[in-house]
């Protein structure tokens, strides 16, 4: 979970140059092998690049055989261990869904926040597989013009609802037209099996893994399918996938609103906040009330973002800014304060929604198309009339009076209605086989995370009996990028197997 909005321009030597990927669907032949190739030009130097053909659609259960003979190409990078000799791979997935993993592995060589500690670099080769539909792995493309049409998701009546469903269907059909049948085969079960195929192709005895946010779901469902193959696994920013639609929404909306309240507390006590000395919560309320009446202009967009900003836009977009407190390489609290101050003065440019383009499918900060297309297969979105959506929102509003339920969960619950691909991996409890050796998985969450609630960390901990759960008592989504104590604990576990005490709390 979490639109993982890293700021591409500030972190990467080269970015957004799209290496055109051949989405060729070919016939399968024998056991998949990694083919090492020269790296595409948007991958910073220092890693090896490879491709592998995997089934377009897998058979059910634990099978990694194709259901049908069509295959797709996946792309991956490998950062060799700093020690000599053969090392096992540590797989990395940054979540989203829709964030490419392969480029981030290389970026980590240059940007310390994105990399791993020396002990992990020594212990493992680090491998990033762009998830199917993402980055260089047969990326999903949708019609950008349809994508950029803003149709309100906070429906007020049947007419709004019909408009929304019509839009969603047209958008989904454009994705299928431009991307082919991959649109039906994007759920995390497929991505788990892709990783299993790559593990085998690399000759790794176990699946060592570090997953952020939505990537924590990949880890959980890997444990479910291949418990005996799990090596060292750490998950940071925990997504639970076991609640009903309404509970999922309330849980995310509440953690967003709670974190927003912390943001106002910070603003009122810290002079770094651009709203310091003014009642920040009241100012935000005024901005929302203004935008709800009439969209606020965004004069600085110049074709890169929407020309104006509605209350709904602000409620969705503010969540991204809360993901990092003061991390310079991502939108953060300091930026949000400035954005609200400017919007209050009539210029809402910074809060405006970015316009999608054909290049967005490979964007290093995440593809908006894959974000939606994957989410629609992994989250339930059952609502067939306006009243069902309104009913769910009216309960949620009591827990989130300012943001009213705007969240990644609500985006899927509204924008996936009418989507042409089926929800193939909707929420349900994990089936952990009690006879199998339950592997010790390290679960990490933070107390004020705007997208992944501490409730989700607890739900997942209960479903994984031998998990060890730790907390960073602080702000923001995920902890590894922050280079604090929590990251040291994660990296020590990955590198050596030394687990922290269950329930340990860290400040940084
Ligand atoms: C004020 O906020 C800044 C930026 O988030 C932070 O670095 C600083 O430590 C805060 N100061 C205090 C006194 O909390
Ligand atoms: C906001 O921008 C849209 C185009 O995205 C335009 O159709 C609409 O009229 C604008 N609304 C206002 C209030 O400026
Ligand atoms: C609006 O804000 C943006 C972002 O801060 C800025 O680049 C732009 O110049 C501003 N435009 C006006 C007309 O004030
Ligand atoms: C975007 O991609 C589609 C499909 O490849 C193509 O038809 C369209 O012309 C592209 N649009 C732009 C602006 O490049």
Image: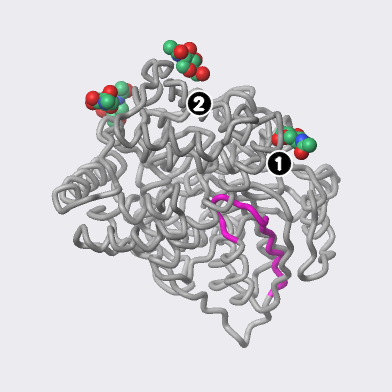
Q: Which mark is residue 79?
A: 1
Q: Nearer the viewer, mark 2 or mark 1?
A: 2
Which residue does the image show at 85% across and 49% down from the upper left? 119
Say if residue 203 shows up in the picture: no
Residue 191, image x and y in percent?
Answer: 49, 57
Q: Which residues are magenta?
A: 439-453
Residue 324, image x and y in percent?
Answer: 63, 40
Q: Is residue 417 magenta?
A: no
The answer for how far apart the CA atoms under marks 2 and 1 are is 21 Å
Give neighbour class at mark 2: few <14, some 14-19, many 20+ (Cα, 10 Å): some
Q: Is residue 452 magenta?
A: yes
Upstream in the sequence, badge 2 or badge 1? Answer: 2
Q: Quadrant of residue 498?
A: bottom right
**Towards the viewer: 115 or 465:** 465
Query: Splitting the image into four quadrants, where does ligand 4 fall?
Result: top left
Which residue does the image show at 32% across and 61% down from the upper left? 381
Q: Which mark is residue 501?
A: none
Q: Is residue 80 above or below residue 38?
A: below
Residue beneath disc 2: 16
Residue 283, image x and y in percent?
Answer: 50, 34
Horizontal relation, residue 57 to residue 230: left or right: left
Give neighbour class at mark 1: few <14, some 14-19, many 20+ (Cα, 10 Å): many
Residue 27, image x and y in percent?
Answer: 36, 52
Q: Quadrant of residue 233?
A: bottom right
Q: Quadrant of residue 60?
A: bottom left
């Amino acid at each position: 979970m979490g639109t993982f909005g890293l700021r591409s321009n500030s972190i990467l030597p080269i970015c957004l140059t799209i290496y055109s990927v051949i989405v060729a669907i070919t016939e399968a032949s024998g056991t998949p092998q990694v083919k090492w190739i020269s790296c595409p030009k948007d991958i910073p130097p220092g890693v090896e690049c490879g491709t592998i053909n995997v089934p377009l659609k897998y058979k059910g259960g634990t099978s990694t055989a194709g259901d049908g003979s069509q295959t797709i190409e996946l792309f991956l990078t490998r950062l060799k261990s700093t020690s000599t000799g053969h090392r096992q791979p540590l797989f990395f997935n940054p979540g989203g869904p829709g964030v490419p993993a392969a480029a981030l592995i290389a970026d980590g060589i240059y940007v310390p926040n994105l990399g791993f500690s020396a002990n992990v670099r020594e212990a493992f080769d680090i491998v990033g597989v762009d998830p199917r539909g993402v980055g260089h792995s047969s990326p999903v493309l949708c019609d950008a013009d349809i994508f950029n049409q803003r149709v309100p998701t906070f429906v007020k009546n049947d007419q709004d609802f019909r408009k929304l469903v019509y839009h969603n269907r047209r958008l989904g059909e454009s994705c299928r037209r431009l991307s082919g049948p991959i649109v039906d085969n994007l759920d995390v079960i497929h991505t788990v099996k892709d990783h299993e195929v790559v593990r085998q192709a690399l000759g790794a005895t176990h699946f060592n893994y570090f997953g952020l946010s939505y990537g924590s779901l990949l880890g959980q469902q890997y444990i479910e399918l291949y418990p005996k193959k799990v090596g060292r696994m750490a998950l940071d920013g925990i997504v639970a996938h076991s609640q009903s639609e309404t509970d999922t929404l309330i849980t995310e909306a509440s953690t967003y609103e709670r974190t927003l309240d912390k943001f106002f507390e910070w603003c009122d006590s810290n002079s770094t906040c651009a709203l310091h000395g003014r009642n920040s919560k009241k100012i935000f309320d005024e901005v929302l009330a203004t935008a709800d009446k009439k969209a606020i202009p965004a004069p600085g967009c110049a074709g890169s973002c929407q020309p104006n900003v509605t209350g709904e836009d602000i409620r969705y977009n503010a969540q991204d800014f809360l993901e990092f407190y003061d991390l310079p390489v991502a939108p953060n609290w300091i930026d949000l304060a400035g954005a609200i101050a400017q919007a209050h003065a009539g210029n809402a440019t910074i809060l405006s929604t970015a316009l999608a383009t054909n290049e967005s499918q490979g964007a290093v900060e995440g593809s908006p198309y894959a974000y939606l297309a994957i989410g629609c297969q992994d989250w339930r979105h059952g609502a067939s009339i306006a009243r069902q959506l309104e009913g769910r929102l009216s309960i949620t509003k009591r827990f989130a009076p300012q943001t009213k339920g705007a969240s990644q969960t609500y985006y899927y619950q509204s924008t996936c209605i009418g989507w042409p691909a089926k929800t193939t991996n909707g929420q349900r409890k994990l089936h952990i086989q009690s006879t199998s050796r339950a592997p010790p998985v390290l679960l990490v969450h933070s107390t004020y995370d705007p997208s992944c609630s501490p409730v989700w960390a607890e739900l997942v901990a209960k479903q994984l009996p031998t998990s060890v759960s730790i907390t960073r008592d602080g702000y923001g989504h995920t902890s590894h990028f922050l280079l604090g104590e929590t990251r040291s604990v994660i990296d020590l576990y990955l590198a050596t197997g030394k687990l922290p005490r269950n329930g340990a709390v860290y400040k940084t």
